[in-house]
Amino acid sequence: MLLVGAALIGGLVMATQKVQASFAAGSLARALARGESIDNLQKQLGVTTRIEHLDDFICVHAIAATEPIEIEEKSCARKLGL
């Protein structure tokens, strides 16, 4: 019974981390598209990033380092910030 409870709590924590990484990726992509610096925002959100430049889009891969796995989410925004 204890093992099942631990697995459920672990799953809930990972789901929360995934939502946070998704929010961070979207926020950072929009900030970059508006031409803002993302250094402070990245520190506040607690993620590391990888930036990808496409034709009309800027994409941000937000990586939340959780042990023992890494959660990565991607979000893109138009370069004009719209």
Image (spheres, rainbow, N blue to C red):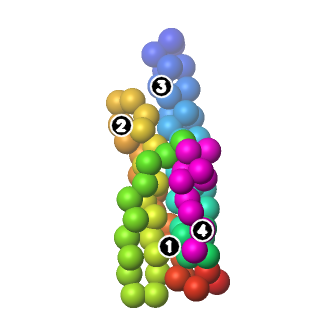
Q: Give, as a single range, the part of the protein colored magenta.
A: 35-45
Q: Residues within 10 Å of mark 3 (few under 14, many from 20)?
A: few
Q: Which percent across, then down, holds residue 78?
A: 54, 82
Q: Sequence order check: which comes first, mark 2 or mark 4?
A: 4
Q: Is residue 5 above or below residue 59?
A: above
For badge 4, the amino acid type reads Glu
Reply yes or no: does residue 53 show up in magenta.
Answer: no
Check if residue 36 falls in the magenta segment.
yes
Between disc 2 and disc 1, whose residue precedes?
Answer: 2
Q: Which residue matches tag 2?
A: 69
Q: Are marks 2 and 1 in contact (CB under 8 Å)?
A: no
Q: Do we see residue 43 in this rendering?
A: yes
Q: Are marks 3 and 1 in contact (CB under 8 Å)?
A: no
Amino acid type at image mark 2 = Ile
Q: Which residue is mark 4?
A: 36
Q: Find disc 1 in the rendering and name its residue.
A: 76
> Mark on residue 5?
none
User: Which element carries disc 3, helix, strand or loop?
Assistant: helix
